[in-house]
Image (spheres, rainbow, N blue to C red):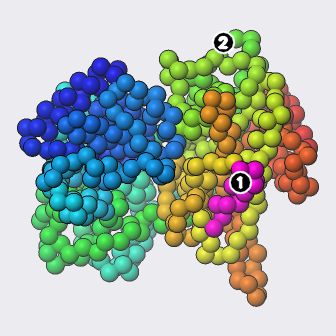
């Protein structure tokens, strides 16, 4: 693998030399700023060997670096070993940023290059400013993946399909109307939509083009006069064509989007999301532009009643599947060989028993013992550990059902619990419970709640570095905005109908990882005369915590009641979906503390 990466680096450097480029920046995304790009756009992976969902490579003629966040530090160290690429850790004191590093290593009058189709307007403007301040030149038309990647995978060719209003809860005409109303309020008359999940939501379409996210590769343009979707012709079935024609949406070729934009009137005012629209497409338009956040992100984040009920039903089926999975683990580990990959395969098998299951919502993290400390660990044939009847197993998994998306993490013991494991688990659980029972005023942002989940750990000088909560789409992206619960200053308040995760953790390198995650629905709370309206959370996820890892001496009476009430709800909601043996197992797991 390392030898191959050296060859790929050398091929890239030769291409750079031919056009006098001194450094090139290669992102890990696609023209739609997707979290999980299709194989066709994974040029960074081909160059460096790093496969994490977040990471940016920078290549010069004699050096190479890869920048990623704390979720991928351990993975990157392993994948970049002997590759010729140096790992730089984002947001770590003493580690240079990409621009700080470039300022150190580039010669005077250097040419910095990138593919403007893969970088947002904001990204390119920041690099333009950097180059101007340092006397460098920026080229945004260097596209080496088009020329030097001989075995490049084909662009995804999966067909789109209609996501029924039975599950979506709102028709396309209504959604387009709400989008254009928001566009008008922002001072524009039309909108360019490039985010795949926003296109899928707006047109009630889904697809299989991106791993774990049921979207189809496309662009869209909406105004009072123009409704166009840009998509490969072979993706459009007769059903999809009729579906789009019924709401006057014209189907255009995917590769025609740039030419279409070039022909727009210079008098037209177009809303462009500078964080989602590529620099190349934004510059193609002679139109006037209003740079603002896409209103679609906020619209789709607030689920309607049909979607919310779908989430609840999906959680019940998912919980029943996990009962079968964890019961199988209990009966199999120590008696038959089971490794981390086997756990994922068994989970998919159990979830697929539902007719509404379509795929997993992300690659399962099955981290046994020290692998659990790698926040985004993904087992392969070489790394997969065989489970033994001892130690901790962290399972982070989720599914895409037609009526909802799930994401759950449970850490369990396979035997021989230590005092430290029980203590650490209970600290994480306390933070998880504190966030779940929070009540907060309307207008509260996620950053204001984040410390609730961290305080039990902070009190003992412990911490985790990932976010506490991310938004979750409805049969869409497992990670969606605009809201979040993390230390970052996200200005978007939580609103009723938003779904977010609650997932504090603790990771001891070389020993184990602990994370506990449920999905929460934001709902209305108390209404007061003097202090205004409040919000709270409804827990959607349905699966018990591991009672064997709970130190009761560390819990308050309120926390014990909260766990018992939750377990009672889990048992009540899952009973009808289980056979007698499965139900007996669950009853044992849900016995009151």
Are there few (<14), some (14-19), or many (20+) residues within 10 Å of tag 1?
Answer: few
Q: CA distance from mark 1 to mark 2?
A: 39 Å
- Kindly identify the residue that appears in the image at 67 percent across and 32 percent down: 512
Whole-percent x, y for residue 458 in the image: 71, 54
Q: Which mark is residue 337?
A: 2
Return the residue found at the far bottom. Answer: 530
Q: Which mark is residue 458?
A: 1
- Kindly identify the residue that appears in the image at 54 percent across and 33 percent down: 377
- Kindly identify the residue that appears in the image at 36 percent across and 55 percent down: 195
Give the residues drawn in magenta, as a range. 448-461
Whole-percent x, y for residue 140 in the image: 18, 53
Are there few (<14), some (14-19), or many (20+) residues within 10 Å of tag 2?
Answer: few
Left or right, residue 48 beside residue 453 = left
Whole-percent x, y for residue 20 in the image: 9, 43
SS for callout 1: helix
- Residue 208 falls within the magenta-colored stretch: no
Residue 298 in sight from this viewpoint: yes
- Kindly identify the residue that appears in the image at 68 percent across and 66 percent down: 523
Q: In this rendered view, identify the residue nearer to me: 189 or 494.
A: 494
Q: Main secondary structure of the magenta part?
A: helix
Q: Specify which label sits upstream in the sequence, 1 or 2.
A: 2
Q: Name the front one of labels 1 and 2.
A: 1
Q: Which mark is residue 504?
A: none
SS for callout 2: loop
Whole-percent x, y for residue 158 in the image: 34, 37
Which part of the image, by quadrant, shows the N terminus? Answer: top left
Residue 37 in sight from this viewpoint: no
Classify residue 353 by image quadrant.
top right
């Amino acid at each position: 693998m390392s030898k191959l990466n050296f060859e790929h680096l050398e091929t890239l450097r030769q291409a750079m030399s031919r056009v006098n480029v001194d450094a090139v920046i290669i992102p890990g995304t696609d023209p739609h700023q997707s979290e999980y790009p299709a194989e066709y756009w994974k040029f960074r992976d081909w160059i460096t060997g790093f496969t994490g969902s977040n990471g940016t490579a920078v290549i010069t003629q004699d050096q190479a670096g890869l920048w990623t966040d704390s979720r991928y530090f351990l993975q990157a160290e392993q994948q970049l070993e002997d590759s010729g690429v140096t790992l730089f850790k984002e947001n770590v004191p003493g580690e240079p940023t990409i621009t700080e590093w470039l300022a150190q290593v580039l010669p005077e009058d250097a040419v910095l290059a990138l593919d403007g189709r893969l970088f947002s307007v904001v990204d390119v403007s920041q690099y333009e400013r950097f180059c101007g301040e340092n006397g460098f030149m920026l080229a945004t038309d260097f596209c080496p993946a088009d020329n030097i990647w001989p075995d490049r995978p084909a662009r995804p060719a999966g067909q789109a399909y209609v996501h029924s209003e039975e599950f979506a809860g709102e028709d396309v005409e209504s959604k387009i109307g709400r989008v254009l109303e928001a566009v008008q309020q922002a001072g524009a008359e039309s909108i360019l939509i490039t985010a795949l999940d926003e296109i899928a939501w707006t047109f009630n379409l889904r697809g299989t083009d991106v791993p774990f996210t049921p979207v189809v590769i496309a662009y869209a343009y909406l105004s009072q006069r123009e409704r166009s979707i840009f998509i490969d012709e072979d993706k459009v079935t007769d059903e999809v064509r009729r579906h789009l024609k019924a709401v006057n949406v014209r189907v255009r070729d995917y590769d025609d989007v740039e030419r279409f934009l070039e022909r727009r009137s210079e008098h037209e005012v177009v809303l462009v999301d500078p964080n989602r629209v590529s620099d190349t497409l934004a510059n193609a338009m002679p139109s006037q532009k209003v740079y603002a956040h896409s209103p679609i992100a906020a619209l789709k984040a607030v689920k309607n009643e049909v979607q919310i009920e779908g989430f609840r039903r999906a959680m019940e089926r998912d919980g029943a599947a996990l009962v079968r999975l964890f019961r199988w683990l209990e009966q199999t580990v120590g008696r038959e060989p089971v490794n981390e990959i086997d756990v994922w395969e068994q989970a998919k098998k159990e979830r697929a028993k539902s007719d509404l299951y379509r795929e997993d919502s992300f690659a399962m993290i099955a981290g046994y013992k020290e692998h659990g400390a790698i926040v985004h660990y993904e087992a392969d044939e070489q790394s997969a550990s065989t489970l033994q009847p001892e130690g901790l197993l962290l399972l982070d998994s989720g599914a895409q059902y037609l009526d909802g998306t799930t994401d759950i993490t449970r850490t369990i013991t396979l035997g021989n619990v230590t005092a430290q494991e029980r203590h650490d688990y209970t600290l994480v659980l306390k933070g998880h419970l504190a966030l779940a029972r929070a009540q907060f005023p309307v207008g509260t942002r996620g950053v204001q709640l984040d410390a609730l989940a961290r305080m039990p750990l902070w009190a003992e000088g412990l911490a985790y570095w990932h976010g506490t909560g991310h938004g979750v789409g409805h049969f869409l992206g497992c990670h969606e905005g605009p809201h979040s619960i993390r230390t970052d200053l996200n200005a978007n308040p939580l609103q009723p109908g938003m779904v977010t995760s609650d997932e504090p953790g603790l990771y001891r390198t070389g020993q184990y990882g602990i994370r506990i995650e449920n999905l929460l629905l934001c709902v209305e709370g108390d209404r007061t005369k003097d202090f205004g309206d409040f919000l709270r959370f409804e827990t959607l996820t349905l699966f018990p915590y591991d009672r064997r890892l709970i130190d009761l001496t560390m819990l308050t009476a309120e926390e014990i009641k909260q766990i018992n009430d939750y377990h009672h709800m889990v048992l009540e909601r899952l009973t009808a979906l289980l056979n007698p043996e499965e139900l007996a197992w669950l009853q044992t797991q849900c016995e009151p503390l």
